[in-house]
Image: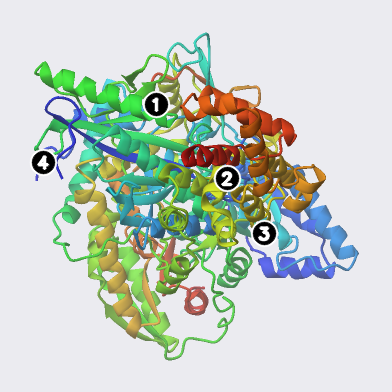
Amino acid sequence: MMSEPITPEEVTHVAYLARLRLTEDELSRFTEQLGAVLTHAADVEALELDDVEPMSHPLPVENTMREDAPQPMLKPSDFLNEAPAVEDGRFLVPKILGEQP
Amino acid sequence: MTSAIPDHYQSASSIAANVASGEISAAETLEQYLNQIEDNEKDVHAFNLVTIDEARALANEIDKLVSKGGNPGPLAGVPVAIKDNLCTRGIPTTASSKILQQWKPPYDATVVRKLKEAGATIIGKTNLDEFAMGSSTENSAFGPTRNPHDFSCVPGGSSGGSAAAVAAGFAPIAIGSDTGGSIRQPASLCGVVGVKPTYGGVSRYGLLAFASSLDQVGPFANSVKDAAIVHEVIGGFDPLDSTSIKEAPSPFTDLLGQGINNLKVGVIKELMGGIDGISDEVIARANEAVTALSNAGAQVEEVSLPAALYCLSAYYLIAPAEASSNLSRYDGVRYGLRVDGNNLNEMNINTRTEGFGDEVKRRIMLGTYALSAGYYDAYYGKALKVRRLLAENFADLYKDYDVLLSPTSPCTAFKIGEKVSDPMTMYVNDVCTIPSNLVGHPAISVPFGIGSDGMPIGIQILAPPMNESVMYQVAETLEQAGT
Amino acid sequence: MSPEIFKENWELVVGLEVHAELATTTKLFCGCLNQFGNEPNTNVCPVCLGLPGSLPVVNEKAVYFAMQLGRALNCTVNRSVFARKNYFYPDMPKDFQISQYDLPTNSDGRLDLPNGITIGIERAHIEEDTGKTTHIGTSGRISGADYSLVDYNRAGVPLIEIVTKPEIHTIDQAKAYVSELRAILLTLGVSDAKMEEGSIRVDANVSIRDIGETNLRTRCEIKNVNSLKSLGRAIDYEANRHIGLYENGESPKQETRHWDENAGRTRSGRSKEDAEDYRYFPEPDLVPLNPSKETITKIDQELPELPAERRKELLDLSGAKPSDIALLVERNHDSFATETITSGGSPNQVIKHLVNNLPDGLGQLTPQTLAQLAQMEEEAKITNTQAKKILEELVEQGGNPSNIAAESGFEAIDTSEVENLVDELITSHSDEWERFCAGEKKVQGFFVGQIMKATSGQADGKLINQILNERSAKK
Ligand SMILES: [Mg+2]
Ligand SMILES: [Zn+2]
């Protein structure tokens, strides 16, 4: 295993992916704490599990679906009042820098 | 005062019977509990919000129905405290996070709707670790909840407010959510009964997601029977939750009072000293529980659950991974907090940086890392495989045993501030409860005496999926032996 | 087959990703209406607004449509698992898109183009659409906007994303692929497939390589293409951009680019910081879809005849031009044509009317009435112009073509009657007749005009010419 399970650079990158900003202080603290969890997780990383089927779901349920039938919808007043900023019945957001990926 | 434990708990079933017969009104019952809250809530801080007006209105409705001769339902007039990560229409639902900024949902969670339909009086929203991430209820944006047995101690978490509310006599019933032990561990630390149902047994619709494949909603109560009754009310198929189970389980109260003669109980040796960090005192008490069950006629044997050794690691990869995605929606666009910025990206970052607490940030980053390109297979992928191994271990054991037993929490309630700065130490609190979440099986924590510090100890009974009736049967026997 | 040359020594390599909105009544994961054109944020609920605590439940009709399309594209229909694609963007209420990743509903199919070329289909998976963002500011574009407004009516609308293998090597093939896919979507009725209204959207993965080279070079994904014409222009622009870079000793970097229709160029769409890392993982709120063998057999049995078969059938029956046949299949008029022809309508007349005179629909017309009309025309009982007038009436009100002809005074003039009139005219105008026989074409008009005058325009022009030619040949 690596001596450092996660670097400050990786933590900075991950924070950006998660839309979080860290102070210098937080960066070193979180790097250490995440490192401790990942070091503990190294026992799992080391397991030989090639033939084991991953289990993303606790129960073997399949094919739960609903009919293509309309259900009651919300009135705009039910949720627009809770929005930080609204214009003409739409949610207002600041200037977007890039196109949708 | 340093504690707030009432002399006597009223059972939910007796309240409902009295309200239905007209002997004591729902309104009168409610006032008794509101008085208790009035007296001790400032010390305990179990609630983010006590919904006095709404509760009085609900109680009056029930009384009106009773006076007209209507059927008020199995929880008629029973005050119920709701964990503040379950949606309540028009009533702030915060997950104890600044980022939701007193958000008022336009809908009720299915569980809340079912409780109201059963005649319950929703009394308020209880405190929790922010977004249910924690084991002490210290990670709340609104301050910690204190253990009613000793105000200097934590109530456990994340459903610490709900556990404390029941222990302090603020409500006979509370609802919590359990992702890695968040009902059972605080139940154990507060000396009440707490149940994590079979995954899919209770609808998650309206539960603010932490880790979707692990989260389950369940009851806190002062008795096993009350827990089973409430579980009956909130459980069942919900077409709004794709992961809810269509088949109806056998009624949870069916086997109560039957004794446990000839039932087979396996005692998980990995959780009885096999894994470091479980206190000797707790193990000793668990062994007394084993003796009690054996005296009651059960066949008790030590069994091995080898994958239990890896559960903590697997859990702390899977749960944060799902959480990192579930919590992306708190971006300042549609509801809750917005901290402005020069552009969308800045606004997103400012909002999330200011709105989330440290523990939530830690888990979001951990989960983002575990899912990110290059690390998925080593971390998240492997964790999912451990989960399969664990499920196979359990399936093998349930060929021979009706239920399994372990302690609920590795220790009794610890001091406020004692563990909060060291995440890894805190995470170890979940070591006994996590296995049931990873495989979706039901488990219950039953109070079983106290430790040398005078604080409660809980014993956990684990059962196969959809087999809660036998879980309640064994838990009731233990409950009787413990008192 | 020799490789197609795009330019000098370069071969074009294109893979297409087509997103088609499925024509369900409700959205993919909630019971909100899947409807276009309503007031903003009126077709929404906690689920498609991504409100905390809400959960998705799959629409069975969307899944059925997706599997139908899969089988129509000769795909294997698999056990499938929904996955979350994580990235922040305000038109996505949950800041992740529910899509399918390593286990899509359909995989490994093919689509045969009308010209015989086969395009491999990699996969066709189900996913949810995003909301709609409007950029407010002087330019109306994303850059230069002051702020944006978001409407979630479209959020959660079911999409099927059909991904080809990188097996398209010309712009015409790319366009033909999209046309054929549209025809299939329309035949199945699973999508409105209107490119201009955005109910189908095409992204093109474009790269370039040396002729004969077998590996794939860096590709760029071109988005925001709104018509077949701009698809062609966008691919052409992007391919040339790549060639330009390679010829300068540089190479393109893999990225998403956006087609700017007005500027006629593609533009890089994202900032450098946003290296794409979608952190796909299985959607824990949904369970796998696992259709039984019986379900798939049933889908196969219920599959309607596909455009290729339909075109072949009509071609065999009518012998008409392939482009006319393709048009009729697209309009869904091919079975009408077949029935009309088998009821005795002459193929030429039937196809001609359906292609040219009936673009707006068939109204009250039936195969039997059109067959009769075509017959009358074929037998020269009525003229072209008269046939068109009768047709209009048949579309509007229905009825019997010969009755309409009689009521309109389009009484057929007997061939022998026209022959008599021609012969009389030849005798009375021998000068003109000599000139006609000498090949002076303009006198032909004189003869036709005179006969038309004598018959009040009811004689068939073609018949007159035919008689004139017979007479002059005999002379
Ligand atoms: Mg897609
Ligand atoms: Zn909706």
Q: Which residue is mark 2?
A: C354
The crowd level at tag 2 (other Cα within 10 Å; few <14, some 14-19, many 20+) is: many
Residue at mark 3: chain: B
Q: Which residue is mark 4?
A: C214
Return the disc, 4 or 2, that comes first in the chain's sequence.
Answer: 4
User: What type is the residue that disc 2 sits on?
Assistant: Leu
* Residue C139 rendering spot, x and y as whole percentages: 49, 10
Q: Nearer the viewer, mark 2 or mark 1?
A: 2
Ligand 1, seen in the image, is in the quarter at top left
* Residue C55 rendering spot, x and y as whole percentages: 52, 50
Q: Nearer the viewer, mark 2 or mark 3?
A: 2
The crowd level at tag 3 (other Cα within 10 Å; few <14, some 14-19, many 20+) is: many
Residue B108 in view: no
Return the disc, 4 or 1, that comes first in the chain's sequence.
Answer: 4
| Separation of marks 2 and 1 at Cα, in angstroms | 29 Å
Q: Residue furthest top?
A: C138
Is circle 3 on the same chain as circle 4? no
User: What type is the residue that disc 4 sits on?
Assistant: Thr
What residue do we see at 67% from left, 33% from top?
Answer: C451
Is circle 4 on the same chain as circle 2? yes
Where disc 3 sits, the SS reads helix
Where disc 2 sits, the SS reads helix
Q: Which residue is mark 3?
A: B115
Q: Are marks 4 and 2 in contact (CB under 8 Å)?
A: no
Towards the viewer: B72 or C210: C210
The crowd level at tag 1 (other Cα within 10 Å; few <14, some 14-19, many 20+) is: some
Q: Which residue is mark 1?
A: C230
Horizontal relation, residue B275 to residue B286: left or right: left
User: What type is the residue that disc 1 sits on?
Assistant: Ser
Where disc 1 sits, the SS reads helix
Return the disc, 2 or 1, that comes first in the chain's sequence.
Answer: 1
Residue at mark 1: chain: C
